[in-house]
Protein backbone atom coordinates (compact mmCIF):
# COMPACT_ATOMS: atom_id res chain seq x y z
CA UNK A 1 0.00 0.00 0.00
CA UNK A 2 1.44 3.37 -1.04
CA UNK A 3 0.69 6.57 0.88
CA UNK A 4 0.11 9.82 -0.97
CA UNK A 5 -0.33 13.25 0.52
CA UNK A 6 -2.28 15.83 -1.43
CA UNK A 7 -1.48 19.55 -1.45
CA UNK A 8 -3.52 22.13 -3.31
CA UNK A 9 -1.76 24.96 -5.09
CA UNK A 10 -3.68 27.32 -7.32
CA UNK A 11 -0.79 27.92 -9.71
CA UNK A 12 0.46 24.38 -10.08
CA UNK A 13 -2.59 22.27 -9.61
CA UNK A 14 -2.71 19.06 -7.65
CA UNK A 15 0.54 17.32 -6.78
CA UNK A 16 0.92 13.99 -5.03
CA UNK A 17 3.91 13.58 -2.72
CA UNK A 18 4.85 10.09 -1.73
CA UNK A 19 6.03 9.26 1.77
CA UNK A 20 9.54 8.70 0.40
CA UNK A 21 9.65 12.21 -1.11
CA UNK A 22 8.53 13.78 2.14
CA UNK A 23 11.07 11.79 4.16
CA UNK A 24 13.84 12.70 1.70
CA UNK A 25 12.96 16.40 1.95
CA UNK A 26 12.94 16.21 5.74
CA UNK A 27 16.30 14.43 5.66
CA UNK A 28 17.82 17.13 3.44
CA UNK A 29 16.56 19.91 5.73
CA UNK A 30 17.97 18.17 8.81
CA UNK A 31 21.28 17.61 7.03
CA UNK A 32 21.51 21.30 6.10
CA UNK A 33 20.77 22.35 9.71
CA UNK A 34 23.40 19.96 11.01
CA UNK A 35 25.93 21.39 8.55
CA UNK A 36 25.22 24.96 9.66
CA UNK A 37 25.58 24.01 13.33
CA UNK A 38 28.83 22.15 12.65
CA UNK A 39 30.36 25.09 10.78
CA UNK A 40 29.41 27.59 13.49
CA UNK A 41 30.85 25.36 16.24
CA UNK A 42 34.01 24.80 14.22
CA UNK A 43 34.54 28.56 13.79
CA UNK A 44 34.02 29.09 17.50
CA UNK A 45 36.50 26.34 18.38
CA UNK A 46 39.13 27.71 15.99
CA UNK A 47 39.02 31.14 17.64
CA UNK A 48 38.82 29.65 21.13
CA UNK A 49 41.85 27.48 20.38
CA UNK A 50 43.92 30.55 19.54
CA UNK A 51 43.23 32.29 22.87
CA UNK A 52 45.48 31.56 25.84
CA UNK A 53 45.61 33.13 29.27
CA UNK A 54 48.93 34.68 30.21
CA UNK A 55 50.39 36.03 33.43
CA UNK A 56 50.55 39.82 33.77
CA UNK A 57 54.30 39.79 34.39
CA UNK A 58 55.01 38.36 30.93
CA UNK A 59 53.82 41.42 29.02
CA UNK A 60 56.28 43.78 30.69
CA UNK A 61 58.98 42.55 28.31
CA UNK A 62 57.56 44.72 25.53
CA UNK A 63 57.22 41.91 23.01
CA UNK A 64 53.41 42.13 22.91
CA UNK A 65 50.83 44.64 21.77
CA UNK A 66 48.57 45.19 24.78
CA UNK A 67 44.95 46.20 24.16
CA UNK A 68 42.59 46.99 27.01
CA UNK A 69 39.05 46.42 25.73
CA UNK A 70 37.26 47.54 28.90
CA UNK A 71 35.16 50.69 28.80
CA UNK A 72 36.64 54.07 29.67
CA UNK A 73 35.21 54.14 33.20
CA UNK A 74 36.67 50.76 34.15
CA UNK A 75 40.05 51.75 32.74
CA UNK A 76 40.07 55.06 34.60
CA UNK A 77 39.21 53.27 37.88
CA UNK A 78 41.92 50.63 37.49
CA UNK A 79 44.35 51.50 34.68
CA UNK A 80 46.69 48.91 33.28
CA UNK A 81 50.21 50.15 32.50
CA UNK A 82 51.42 50.11 28.89
CA UNK A 83 48.00 49.15 27.52
CA UNK A 84 46.22 50.98 24.74
CA UNK A 85 42.57 51.44 25.66
CA UNK A 86 40.29 50.52 22.76
CA UNK A 87 36.80 49.68 24.09
CA UNK A 88 35.28 46.56 22.59
CA UNK A 89 32.57 48.54 20.81
CA UNK A 90 35.23 50.59 18.98
CA UNK A 91 37.59 47.71 18.20
CA UNK A 92 36.22 46.77 14.72
CA UNK A 93 36.39 50.40 13.60
CA UNK A 94 39.97 50.82 14.83
CA UNK A 95 41.04 47.57 13.18
CA UNK A 96 39.51 48.66 9.86
CA UNK A 97 41.19 52.06 9.90
CA UNK A 98 44.68 51.16 11.09
CA UNK A 99 46.29 48.95 13.65
CA UNK A 100 50.06 48.78 13.09
CA UNK A 101 51.07 45.89 15.32
CA UNK A 102 53.18 43.02 14.09
CA UNK A 103 53.63 41.39 17.51
CA UNK A 104 51.41 38.90 19.32
CA UNK A 105 48.46 40.53 21.04
CA UNK A 106 47.45 40.53 24.71
CA UNK A 107 43.84 41.46 25.42
CA UNK A 108 42.94 42.86 28.81
CA UNK A 109 39.31 42.37 29.74
CA UNK A 110 37.05 41.87 32.72
CA UNK A 111 35.02 39.02 31.20
CA UNK A 112 35.55 35.98 28.98
CA UNK A 113 32.82 36.99 26.52
CA UNK A 114 34.64 40.19 25.67
CA UNK A 115 37.89 38.28 25.15
CA UNK A 116 36.24 35.87 22.71
CA UNK A 117 34.59 38.67 20.76
CA UNK A 118 37.78 40.73 20.57
CA UNK A 119 39.72 37.64 19.49
CA UNK A 120 37.17 37.07 16.73
CA UNK A 121 37.69 40.62 15.44
CA UNK A 122 41.47 40.33 15.71
CA UNK A 123 41.60 36.93 14.02
CA UNK A 124 39.99 38.42 10.91
CA UNK A 125 42.74 41.04 10.61
CA UNK A 126 45.83 39.44 12.07
CA UNK A 127 47.38 36.01 12.22
CA UNK A 128 49.29 34.94 15.27
CA UNK A 129 48.72 34.02 18.86
CA UNK A 130 46.23 35.96 20.98
CA UNK A 131 46.65 36.05 24.75
CA UNK A 132 44.47 37.56 27.43
CA UNK A 133 44.60 38.78 30.99
CA UNK A 134 41.38 38.79 32.97
CA UNK A 135 41.27 41.58 35.53
CA UNK A 136 38.70 41.87 38.30
Image (cartoon, grey):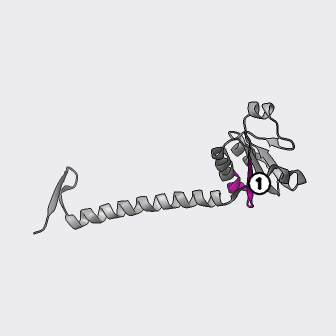
Quarter of the view holding residue 51? bottom right
- Which quarter of the picture shows residue 83? top right
Q: Which residues are magenta?
A: 122-133
| Image position of 6 (left or right of 80) | left
Closest to the observer, 95 or 43: 43
Left or right of residue 20, residue 28 in this image = right
Q: Can the viewer see residue 86?
A: yes
**Which quarter of the rendering shows the N terminus?**
bottom left
Is residue 100 at least partly visible in the picture? Answer: no
Q: Residue at 82% of width from left, 36% of height from top?
A: 79
Labels in figure, total: 1
Name the spot of residue 8 as percent of width and height, x first.
18, 52
Q: Is residue 129 magenta?
A: yes
Based on the picture, tell me whether residue 3 belongs to the magenta stretch: no
| Residue drawn at 22 percent across, 52 percent down | 11
Instruction: Name the residue at 36% across, 60% down.
Output: 29
Q: Position of residue 21 (x, y in %)?
A: 25, 65
- Crowding near the residue tagged with mark 1, few <14, some 14–19, many ≥20 C-alpha atoms within 10 Å: some
Residue reaching furthest to the bottom: 1
Looking at the picture, does residue 31 appear above or below residue 62? below
| Circle 1 SS class | loop
Q: Is residue 61 left or right of residue 108?
A: right
Quarter of the image that includes the C terminus: top right
Across and down, in percent, residue 9 comes to 21, 51
Query: Mark 1 = which residue?
Result: 54
What residue do we see at 82% from left, 51% from top?
65
User: Can you give x and y, in whole percent of width and height, for residue 129 in the image?
Assistant: 74, 60
Q: Give the farthest residue toward the left.
A: 1
Q: Is residue 8 above or below residue 1?
A: above
Amino acid sequence: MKFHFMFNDEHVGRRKFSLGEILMGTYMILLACLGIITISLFNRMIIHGRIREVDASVIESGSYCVIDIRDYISVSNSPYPSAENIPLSYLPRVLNSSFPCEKDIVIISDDQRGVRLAAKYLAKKKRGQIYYIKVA
